[in-house]
Amino acid sequence: MDRVTNLIIGSNKDTLVHTDNFARSIGFNTRILTTSLKGEASQAGYRLCVEAKALLNHPHPIRRPACFLAGGATTVTVRGDGLGGRNLELALGTVKSISGSDQIVLVSLATDGGDGPTDAAGAVATNETYTRGLALGFDPDDYLQKNDSYHYFEPLDDLIKIGPTLTNVNDLVLIFTT
């Protein structure tokens, strides 16, 4: 065991810091919300959106355009027989709460390029996703109950498909507001 050396060459925190710096360089006001995102995926996404909205409406608010970042690994309690992963479920859990006139875009993705047993890394949810889904007869709560987030986002063309990255530093969530 004396000859074993472990060297961390990248981490979720490193990725968040670099993403934060890039977002600042292109004009976003940023805030890293957490580097240890955990808990039930659909609830974690909702909590992140609540926190981001609170920071926008704080007495000393983050000015728009803003980019809020989070990283970590959530969990999904499987109750149904649908298709999805924790990033897809996190995004689906936010669809109703970000619906409305505020311009919000949430991106949740797996850094390895695959979310659960799917070909998607994650999904994009916007303030218009809920309305677009309803127009197709989709109730996000039904899809959450079936753990079928993939089939909610697929017809909306809101899946993120990047292919394998051959690396994994947990998940990233970005919330943009304009």
Image (cartoon, rainbow, N blue to C red):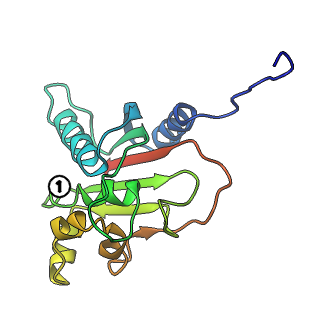
Q: Is residue 9 left or right of residue 110?
A: right
Q: Is residue 8 above or below residue 87?
A: above
Residue at 36 percent of width and 62 percent of height: 124
Q: Position of residue 151 (x, y in %)?
A: 34, 76
Badge 1: few (under 14), some or many (20 or more) residues near its Cα, within 10 Å? few
Q: Quadrant of residue 134?
A: bottom left
Closer to us: 67 or 50: 50
Residue at 32 percent of width and 67 percent of height: 149
Q: Position of residue 56 (x, y in %)?
A: 20, 37
Residue at 13 percent of width and 26 percent of height: 59
Q: How many marks?
A: 1
**In what element is the residue under mark 1?**
loop
Name the residue beneath numbered marker 1: 102
Residue at 22 percent of width and 47 percent of height: 46
Q: Is residue 73 above or below residue 128?
A: above
Q: Is residue 64 above or below residue 112?
A: above
